[in-house]
Amino acid sequence: MEILLSALLLGLVSAGHCAGMCGGIVAAFTLQSTPATSLIPLHLAYNLGRILTYSALGGIAGALGGATLLIEHALPIQSILRMAANLMLVALGFYLMGFTRLLAPIERAGYVIWRLVQPLTRSWLPADRPHRALALGVLWGFLPCGLVYSVMVTALASGGTWQGALTMLAFGIGTLPALLCASLLFRQPGRLRNLRTVRTAFGTLIMALGLLGLIHAMHHVIV
């Protein structure tokens, strides 16, 4: 439960970053010359697709992490994974504060997959139907993002396939309010993202969670 709440909180406090990463496609929906009410299904379908991808990636990460339980008697693999997850939270705190280079190497690795996926997105544009928006969201979920990858490390340490999937699901749900708000006022989240005080506060909160989790994980390793 603690992991799920942390993932949900991460999604909520990353509002500005998520709007910055996905704001382009959200703005494209918003600027379509159709009534605002008819855009709601498109936004919901797009976000559903994005969250489905996050959940699937979380499930894969959780399965890989859960497999290490088979050798837990030989090496404290799960404890090491928990420490790595909390170190990523600390790095993520810095990331939200604007020190994006800390996670840049991880994002660059993600571009290997994104280069394969990105051409497929053209097949679903314009996303003027819910099924097209859903497919576009599924593909857009692979967009390289240090924030998403940080939560995936947490999913890796969650202990199993369903735990990992639920971790990323909670994170995806947490990002939902920001992107739905962006569908109405897509410029506002960008302004929020530029408020250094807000970014610093969010980053400090995430760093504190990471440090507390790291101390807890180290205690288990020592004991």
Image (cartoon, helix red, strand yellow):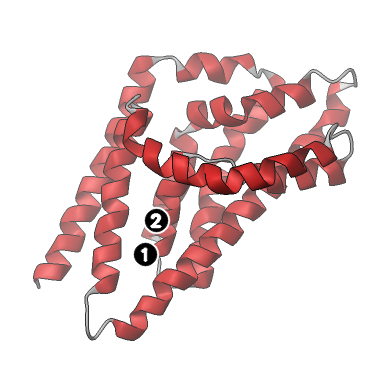
Depth check, front residue: 181 or 151: 151
Position of residue 89 relative to residue 178, above or below, is below
| Residue displayed at 46% across by 67% down | 62
Q: Position of residue 24 (x, y in %)?
A: 66, 24
Residue 110: mark? none
Q: Quadrant of the N terminus?
A: bottom left
Q: Is residue 180 above or below residue 149?
A: above
The local secondary structure at tag 1 comes to loop
Q: Amino acid at mark 1?
A: Ala
Indicate the quadrant containing the C terminus: top left, top right, bottom left or bottom right.
bottom left
Neighbour tally class for label 1: few under 14, some 14-19, many 20 plus, Cα within 10 Å: many
Closer to the camera, 42 or 2?
42
One can see residue 121 in this view: yes
Q: Residue at x 30, y 63 (%)?
A: 81
* Rendered image: mark on residue 153: 2
Amino acid type, callout 2 = Val
Q: Mark 2 touching mark 1, by CB under 8 A?
A: yes
Please rate how many residues cluster around mark 2, counting C-alpha atoms within 10 Å: few if below 14, some from 14 to 19, many from 20: many
Front residue of 178/113: it is 113
Residue at the farthest left position: 222
User: Where is residue 115 shown, x and y percent of the image?
Assistant: 62, 42
Residue 41 visible from this viewpoint:
no
Residue found at x 60% / y 34%:
177
Side of 116 relative to 39 (left or right): left
**Residue 25, image quadrant:** top right
SS class of the residue under badge 2?
A: helix
Residue 142 spot, x, y in % from top left = 60, 46
Q: Position of residue 109 (x, y in %)?
A: 46, 46
Residue that badge 1 annotates: 157
| Gap between marks 2 and 1 measured at Cα | 7 Å
